[in-house]
Amino acid sequence: MEVINLAFIAKRRAECGWTQQDMAEFLGFKNASAYQKYEKGEYAFKAIHLPILARKLGCDLQDLFYNRQVF
């Protein structure tokens, strides 16, 4: 099962020098606190957000996921 890798998103955002406010504006959110809720997993990123995130973070879409084993 593929799961969005929120830790990767936060780490990559910091590596790129983007603030949460930058990301909020890029994704069309009202403010950084709204974006923060997505990055912390309180809200789920929508499918439409993922290619936008990958482009902004300079990574492949697949990089936003990790494989979680389900037993």
Image (cartoon, grey):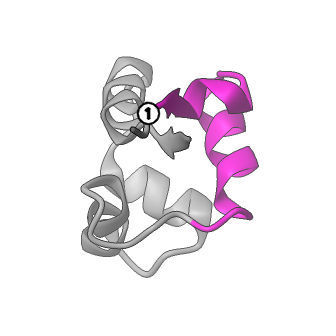
Q: Which residue is found at the position 60% from the left and 24% from the top? A: 63
Where is residue 7 drawn, in percent x and y?
A: 30, 33
60 inside magenta stretch: yes
Report whether 66 appears left or right of 61: left
Tell me if mark 1 has few (under 14), some (14-19) or many (20+) residues whose alpha carbon lies within 10 angstroms of its own.
few
In this view, which residue lies farthest toward the bottom?
A: 30
Residue assigned mark 1: 68
56 inside magenta stretch: yes
Q: Which residue is found at the position 49% from the left and 44% from the top? A: 4
Q: Quadrant of the C terminus?
A: top left
- Compared to residue 36, the image places residue 30 above or below, namely below
Where is residue 40 drawn, in percent x and y?
A: 24, 56
- Compared to residue 8, the image places residue 6 above or below, namely below
Secondary structure, mark 1, is loop
Report whether 2 appears left or right of 48: left
Type of the residue with mark 1: Arg
- Compared to residue 38, the image places residue 30 above or below, namely below
Q: As rendered, which of 15 and 71 lies closer to the eye?
A: 71
Q: In which quarter of the image is the N terminus?
A: top right
In this view, which residue lies farthest toward the front?
A: 71
Report whether 4 appears left or right of 31: right
- Compared to residue 69, the image places residue 40 above or below, namely below
In the image, which residues are magenta? 46-68
Q: As rendered, which of 1 and 24 lies closer to the eye?
A: 1
Residue 6: quarter of image: top left
Count the marks: how many? 1
Q: Which residue is found at the position 66% from the left and 36% from the top? A: 54
Residue 15: quarter of image: top left
Where is residue 52 drawn, in percent x and y?
A: 70, 49
